[in-house]
Image (cartoon, rainbow, N blue to C red):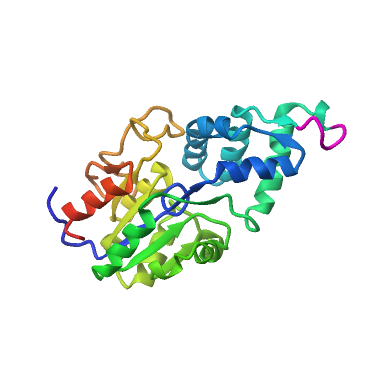
């Protein structure tokens, strides 16, 4: 691919891009509340849960928050069960009710103990390499308001010029406002961004909607974008003319499954 001249800054999503769900931590937190779930089962169930998340995003903000739908689906598919030696009486709870109760508790606790804290191999190093090449770099994420503190806790805050947390700014991807806010913080126009993220609905559609470039960090290995509310796995090729946020034509979306593949794209684009 040839160099795209107008890219002047790069933004990364956080969850499942820079950091991933720590399923070991999730299992231990679930056990704190008198239930058991296998780490292996959690790992095996994440793809189905992310499909639920994508469907929630495509349906808009009118229903239950996408995070809650993701977590409830994950716990249900992973077959959460009552701990035989904890919380007297919990053994009689239906599994669906238990998953719902734990989802609500985890949602309240997420700002206190973020479950997305396991660094994705090579990604923070790649962000630092971009900055060494004088490329402004930011984080643009739907989070709970304490993302900067988490990145600082991981010792990586100095790798970024700005952190845009939806819980702080009051709008979420794929809304164009959050992309424009981040671009302004980086000193560029939204059309001059290259955004990398795992959610086709939130990250890719959101970025393309403001005229930015995007790379789908598809570490889960989906063959095509997760299903939208309308069903199917159709990639974005042309935007509906009725949607003024979308360009009249959309290039094929680049994909990467590892930091190494992502770096190759950066080199092809003339960023490294």
User: In which quadrant of the rendered image does the C terminus lie?
Assistant: bottom left
Q: How many numbered badges does the structure rendering display?
A: 0
Viewer can see residue 244: no
Q: Position of residue 53 (x, y in %)?
A: 51, 39
State the image quarter where residue 69 is shown. top right
State the image quarter where residue 188 is shown. bottom left
Q: Position of residue 139 (x, y in %)?
A: 42, 61
Residue situated furthest left in the rendering: 2
- Name the foreground residue: 28 vs 100: 28
- Which residue is pictured at 36% across the width and 40% down the height? 218
- Name the foreground residue: 139 vs 86: 86
- Residue 223 left/right relative to 77: left
- The main secondary structure of the magenta stretch is loop
Residue 88 covered by magenta stretch: yes
- Name the foreground residue: 2 vs 156: 156
Establish if 167 lies above or below 73: below
Establish if 209 lies above or below 31: below
Viewer can see residue 67: yes
State the image quarter where residue 194 is shown. bottom left
Residue situated furthest right in the rendering: 88
Residue 123 covered by magenta stretch: no
- Residue 104 left/right relative to 257: right
Q: Position of residue 144 (x, y in %)?
A: 58, 57
Q: Which residues are magenta?
A: 83-89
- Which residue is pictured at 87% across the width and 32% down the height? 89
Q: Position of residue 249 (x, y in %)?
A: 22, 45
């Amino acid at each position: 691919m040839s160099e795209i001249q107008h890219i002047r800054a790069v933004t990364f999503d956080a969850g499942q891009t820079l950091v991933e769900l720590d399923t070991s931590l999730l299992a231990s937190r679930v056990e704190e509340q008198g239930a058991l779930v296998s780490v292996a089962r959690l790992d095996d169930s994440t793809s189905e849960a992310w499909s639920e998340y994508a469907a929630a995003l495509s349906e808009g903000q009118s229903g239950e928050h996408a995070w809650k739908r993701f977590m409830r689906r994950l716990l249900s598919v992973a077959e959460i069960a009552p701990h035989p030696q904890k919380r007297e009486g919990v053994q009689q709870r239906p599994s669906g009710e238990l998953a719902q109760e734990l989802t609500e508790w985890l949602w309240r606790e997420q700002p206190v103990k973020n479950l997305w804290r396991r660094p994705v191999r090579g990604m923070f190093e790649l962000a630092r390499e971009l900055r060494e090449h004088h490329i402004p770099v930011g984080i643009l994420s739907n989070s709970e308001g304490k993302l900067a503190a988490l990145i600082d806790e991981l010792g990586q805050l100095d790798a970024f010029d700005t952190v845009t947390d939806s819980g702080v700014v009051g709008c979420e991807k794929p809304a164009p406002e959050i992309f424009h806010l981040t671009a302004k913080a980086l000193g560029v126009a939204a059309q001059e961004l290259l955004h990398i993220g795992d959610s086709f609905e939130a990250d890719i559609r959101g970025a393309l909607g403001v005229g930015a470039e995007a790379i789908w960090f598809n570490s889960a290995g989906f063959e095509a974008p997760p299903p939208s509310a309308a069903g199917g796995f159709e990639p974005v090729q042309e935007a509906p003319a009725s949607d003024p946020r979308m360009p009249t034509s959309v290039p094929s979306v680049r994909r990467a499954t590892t930091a190494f593949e992502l770096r190759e794209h950066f080199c092809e684009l003339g960023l490294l």
